[in-house]
Image (cartoon, rainbow, N blue to C red):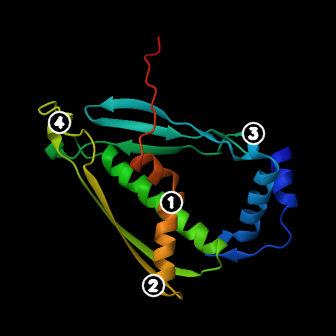
Amino acid sequence: MISCAMNQINQQIKKEQIVNGVNVSKLFGTVEAIKGNPEIAKFNFKAKGKWINGGYNRTTINEFYGACQNFQRSQSFVFEKDEPPVLLGEDHGANPVEYVLAALDGCLITSLIYHAAAKGIKIDEVETSFSGDLNLHGFLGLDENTRNGYDKIKVEFKIKADAPKEKLQELVQLAQKRSPVFDIVSHSTPVEVSLKE
């Protein structure tokens, strides 16, 4: 059964237009539906974690809430995390701070592509490069003045498109402005941690 929210979104779609693999008709239909019912815009994403051994742990992603309904995927996504041997792990997966770079990468690219599509700018190719500086003094508790996390993250975009450099620079700025993960990483987000019995 299609929810009320999805009906509202679908009613906004006149004809289908695809740019950069993004259904721009649905994108604008979603925007109009949200303007008509702001509750559609509220989402809640969830993750479940399990420790395996040493630095090795696993996160499973499946259900989420959005567009006024609960969603259950047909297949869960599983993220294996570990540390490299130099950090006493066995390299079963990228480490958590590398996953932060991956999340930021994915969100910046998606934000850039969606906003380019909305503006009718066709993108042929996007490549990114990320690096993050981190000092173990914080994590190991050796210096209380050293951050536990990244001191700085550097991001480089390489974009191939039929658009002037100024337009591409605007898209990079817009991706930063609208990316949820960029916002999470660059601004303090309250995190509530508790011990469950």
Give the mark nearer the N terminus: 4 vs 1: 4
Find disc 4 in the rendering and name its residue.
145
Residue 177 disc label = 1
| Numbered badge on residue 69 | 3
How far apart are labels 2 and 4 at the CA level?
Answer: 40 Å
Q: Quadrant of the N terminus?
A: top right
Foreground: disc 3 or disc 2: 2
Q: Earlier in the sequence, mark 3 or mark 1?
A: 3
Label 3, label 1: how far apart the Cα atoms are: 27 Å
Q: Please say if 88 is above or below 23.
A: above
Instruction: Give the amino acid at mark 3.
Output: Gln
Where disc 2 sits, the SS reads helix
Marks 3 and 1: CB-CB under 8 Å?
no
Mark 3 / mark 2, whichever is N-terminal? 3
Q: Residues within 10 Å of mark 2 (few under 14, many from 20)?
A: few
Q: Which badge, 2 or 4, is on the more N-terminal residue?
A: 4
Q: Say what amino acid the circle numbered 1 marks.
A: Lys
Mark-to-mark CA distance, 3 and 4: 44 Å
Q: Nearer the viewer, mark 3 or mark 1?
A: 1
Percent coordinates x, y for residue 84 in the rendering: 21, 47
Label pair 2/4, CB-CB below 8 angstroms: no
| Neighbourhood count class around disc 3 (C-alpha, 10 Å): few under 14, some 14–19, many 20 upward | some
Residue in the foreground of this view, choosing between 159 and 63: 159
**Structural distance between the alpha carbons of marks 3 and 2:** 41 Å
Residue at (33%, 44%) from the top-left corner? 96
Task: Quickly name the residue at label 2.
Answer: 165
Q: Secondary structure at mark 3?
A: strand
Label 2 sits on what residue type? Lys
Q: Nearer the viewer, residue 73 or 184?
A: 184
Q: Which quadrant would residue 129 be assigned to in this image? A: bottom left
Badge number at residue 149: none
